[in-house]
Structure formats: C-alpha cells, structure tokens
Image (spheres, grey):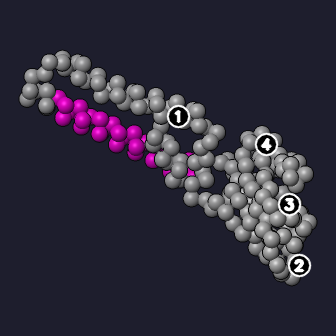
Amino acid sequence: MLGTVIGSLLFRTNLVLMVTDIAFILIVFLVQKTGERLIDRAAVKKPAKVSGKQTRYIGTAMLTAAVLIFACGIALQKNQIAAGSIGQPQSQKAAMDEENDLQLATIEINASGFSPKNTELRSGSMVKAIVNVKSNAGTGLKLVSKELNLSADLKAGQNMFLINNPQPGIYELILEPKHLKSTLTVKAGSK
C-alpha cells in the first residue's frame, strides 16, 4: 500500500505506477527475508527462551499490523488524499489580454481535482475562465459557486465562463458530486 501511495504521488501514468509497485514489493520482500535470516543466525548463536516458531511470527505479525494501520488510514482519508496533485501548481495568476481588457484563467479538472487550487484575479476587468475537464475526471460533474451564483454542468473538454467585473474577495468553486474545492481570489488592482 505504501508503494502504491508513493508511486501515485510521483507518477501519473498507470504503467510507471505498476512498475513502481512491483519494484517496491520486491524490495520489501528482500528486506523481510534478509531480516529473517539475520534473526535465524542470531537465534542459532544464542539459545533463546522463546521458541523459534514464535520468533518467526513476530516479524510477520508486526508487518501485518503495519499494513492494517496503513489500510485504515488510507480508507479513512480517501477523500482527502489528492495524490495526483503532487507536483501540480497550487496557485496561478490570470494572464492579462490588454487589448481586450480581459483576464484569462485556465483551470484544469482531472481525477484528483482542480489544478491549480487557487487562481488570482484582479478586480476591474472581465474574466474569461476556461475550465478544462480531462477525460479521467469522471462524468456528471457540476461546477457550483454560491458567491458567484453559478451552477453549471461540465462536459469533457473546455468549458468557458465569463465573470463581469469581479469584486475583491475569495470565491469558492465546488466540483459536485466529488465535493472538491478551488478558489478564485480577486484582489483590488489597477489597470
């Protein structure tokens, strides 16, 4: 499980993730077997009060307990773990189209949620927000913002939204039904 989490944090393709998982399993197996050999050698050199069968099961029991703890932790936090967002930008500033007095912001939605989590805008000019929904994000998605009075179904590909003269503040975007969140931070600014 630890190998899966580490692999998914570092890589985005399934093939690399699978190779990383297999390599991790082999390394853990080799470490466990080496540890068992060292324990067996130590047991041969010194007679122990504990029988050999009990000594062999201690390592397995500890490993099983660790796996169960990790499994419970992952199961409890499954909605909080956004492994695909590792390495992704957490914030961006909208690009300015001076000719049209328009701010351009591109927000990507993939299986792990919004990328970036926050987009910085300035007040005083219209915003053209392009929400690019990747195919791995799922279907039946809806973008909701109470502050912006927005509730729109999203389709795969580019979805375009215009915000006229946003006022300074922080506006929350929620991706339903996944309940993933992003923010638009509008700062007072001059042209």
Residue nearest the viewer, comparing 13 with 182: 182
Q: Amino acid at mark 3?
A: Met
Mark 1 lies on a secondary structure that is helix
Labels 3 and 2: the sequence-earlier one: 2
Cα distance in 3D space between marks 4 and 3: 17 Å
Which residue has dot 1 on it? 73
Labels 1 and 2: the sequence-earlier one: 1
Q: Nearer the viewer, mark 3 or mark 1?
A: 1
Local packing at callout 3 (Cα closer than 10 Å; few below 14, some 14-19, many 20+) is few
Which residue has dot 4 on it? 176
Could you tell whether 24 is left or right of 162 in the image?
A: left
Q: Quadrant of residue 106?
A: bottom right
Which residue has dot 2 on it? 100
Local packing at callout 2 (Cα closer than 10 Å; few below 14, some 14-19, many 20+) is few
At 59% from the left and 37% from the top, the residue drawn is 77
Residue 20 lies in the magenta stretch: yes
Q: Amino acid at mark 2?
A: Asn
Q: Nearer the viewer, mark 3 or mark 2?
A: 2
Mark 2 lies on a secondary structure that is loop
Cα distance in 3D space between marks 2 and 4: 32 Å
**C-beta proximity under 8 Å, tags 2 and 4:** no
Mark 4 lies on a secondary structure that is strand
Q: Nearer the viewer, mark 1 or mark 2?
A: 1
Which residue has dot 3 on it? 160
Labels 1 and 4: the sequence-earlier one: 1
Query: Magenta stretch mostly in which secondary structure?
Result: helix
Local packing at callout 1 (Cα closer than 10 Å; few below 14, some 14-19, many 20+) is few
